[in-house]
């Protein structure tokens, strides 16, 4: 049973390509960790986007009919913090993603209807999206 | 409640005696399918109220009576025993003053302007069961469940009932279920203008208002109009709420 489940899970795990800063910050809590779940007629995916600030991330998510998903955004400079002291801390980014543009691309297990998509960028830095499967894959092929 | 409770037990012994006599004669004379027995039972109940002598004499002429009741049954074939017992209190207004019992205290979810009545079923197989009835004073509408009331409060219209071809015992439940189905089909018709066939190749979803987590779809460079976006959302919620099957055309 477990072996079966593992095989299934492995099947669901698509190759993820990271470019830009997301590629460099791979030691710490990395950006672009994804999980995909399926239901009868929908997929759900969760993408970890730590360090992506809600208000200035310019987050966008492209859904293609063949199931390709591309998430683009901006990691902003988080180094300069003023904490009551007149000192500006300069962060040397070693573990986290350095600021800059990033993309996370992956492919869902099947074709989807890009219109039927409900994304949620949760405050904990996880982007969660539900996409309905394409109802008529035959039409698509 | 206490005033209405005594009468049914007074009738019941006679009923039982009739029941005992008639089915036996039925089975002796011919093989009769079982559902006719409850109808006989209710028919004899009506006669029993007028006088007990008539019932005892008519016991000899059970074949004739069975035919007459069968004629009644063919006139309205949909009524089973349960349906009759359930629908009887509401279809016969004459019984209403008799059956009305204590108006219980209104539950806290009910807004002012409503009254609640507990009514005890006086006849049928389910006699003695208590039904709650909700009356909207302003409109005079009567509702038989909290669900119906909430629907009325939400929409201002009464839920339409299906024709009585559902099981009598499932009457209240069945009606609500059927109306639910109706609603969902209604929803489907409103979403029929959603073109399930021609999904676009690519849609770009942009986080436009991060504080409210609102996303706007773009196709190419053009922003998708809000009306179409809402259509998509409606189709999405419809698909997710219907709990599985894609719409079949």
Image (cartoon, coloured by chain):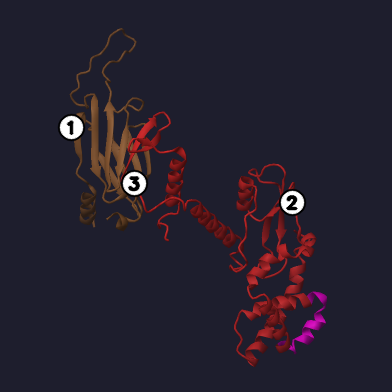
Chain colours: A brown, B red
Check the image and report above or below for A103 versus B132. Answer: above
Left or right of A79: which side holds B157?
right
- In this rendering, does residue B195 appear at all? yes
Task: Verify CB contact (< 8 Å) between mark 2 and mark 3.
Answer: no
* Picture residue at 65% right of the left edge, 92% below the top: B29
Which residue in the protein does label 1 denote?
A23
* Residue B57 magenta: yes
* Residue B201 magenta: no
User: Residue B8 at what x, y percent from top left?
Assistant: 74, 69
Instruction: Please state, as top left, top right, bottom left or bottom right, where the C terminus of chain B lies in the image.
Output: bottom left
Q: CA distance from mark 1 to mark 3?
A: 30 Å
Q: Is the magenta region chiefly helix, strand or loop?
A: helix
Which disc number belongs to residue B140?
2
Depth order, front residue of B124/B201: B201
What subunit carries mark 2?
A: B
Task: Verify CB contact (< 8 Å) between mark 1 and mark 2.
Answer: no
* Picture residue at 65% right of the left edge, 53% below the top: B158
Q: Secondary structure at mark 2?
A: loop
Q: CA distance from mark 2 to mark 3?
A: 51 Å
Local crowd size for mark 2, using a 10 Å CA cut-off: few (<14), some (14–19), many (≥20) = few
Check the image and report above or below for B51 versus B238. Answer: below
The stretch in magenta equals B48-62
Q: CA distance from mark 1 to mark 2?
A: 69 Å
User: Looking at the image, is mark 2 or mark 3 nearer the viewer?
Assistant: 3
């Amino acid at each position: 049973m477990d072996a079966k489940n593992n095989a299934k899970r492995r099947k669901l795990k698509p190759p993820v390509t990271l470019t830009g800063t997301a590629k460099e910050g791979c030691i710490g809590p990395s950006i672009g960790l994804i999980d995909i779940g399926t239901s009868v007629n929908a997929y759900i995916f969760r993408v970890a986007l730590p360090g992506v600030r809600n208000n200035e991330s310019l987050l966008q998510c492209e859904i293609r009919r063949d199931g390709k998903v591309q998430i683009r955004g901006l990691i902003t400079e988080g180094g300069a913090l003023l904490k009551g002291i007149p000192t500006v801390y300069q962060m040397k980014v070693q573990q986290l993603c350095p600021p800059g543009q990033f993309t996370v691309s992956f492919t869902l297990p099947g074709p989807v209807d890009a219109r039927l998509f409900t994304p949620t960028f949760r405050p904990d830095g996880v982007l969660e999206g539900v996409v309905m499967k394409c109802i008529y894959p035959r039409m698509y092929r | 409640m206490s005033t209405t409770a005594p009468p049914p037990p007074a009738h019941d012994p006679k009923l039982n005696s009739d029941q005992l006599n008639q089915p036996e004669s039925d089975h002796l004379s011919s093989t009769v399918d079982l559902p006719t027995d409850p109808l006989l039972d209710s028919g004899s109940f009506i006669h029993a109220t007028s006088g007990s002598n008539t019932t005892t004499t008519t016991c000899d002429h059970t074949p004739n009576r069975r035919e007459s009741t069968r004629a009644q049954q063919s006139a309205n074939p949909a009524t089973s025993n349960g349906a009759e017992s359930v629908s009887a209190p509401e279809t016969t207004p004459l019984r209403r003053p008799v059956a009305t019992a204590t108006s219980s205290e209104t539950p806290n979810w009910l807004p002012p302007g409503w009254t609640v009545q507990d009514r005890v079923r006086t006849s049928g197989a389910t006699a003695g069961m208590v039904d709650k009835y909700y009356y909207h004073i302003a409109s005079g509408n009567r509702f038989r469940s909290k669900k119906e009331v909430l629907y009325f409060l939400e929409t201002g219209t009464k839920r339409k009932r299906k024709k009585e071809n559902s099981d009598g015992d499932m009457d209240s439940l069945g009606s609500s279920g059927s109306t639910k189905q109706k609603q969902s089909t209604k929803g489907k018709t409103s979403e029929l203008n959603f073109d399930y066939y021609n999904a676009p190749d690519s849609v770009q979803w942009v986080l436009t208002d991060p504080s409210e987590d609102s996303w706007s779809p773009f196709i190419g460079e053009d922003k998708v109009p809000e009306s179409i976006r809402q259509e998509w959302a409606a189709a999405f919620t419809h698909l997710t709420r219907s709990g599985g099957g894609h719409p079949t055309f």
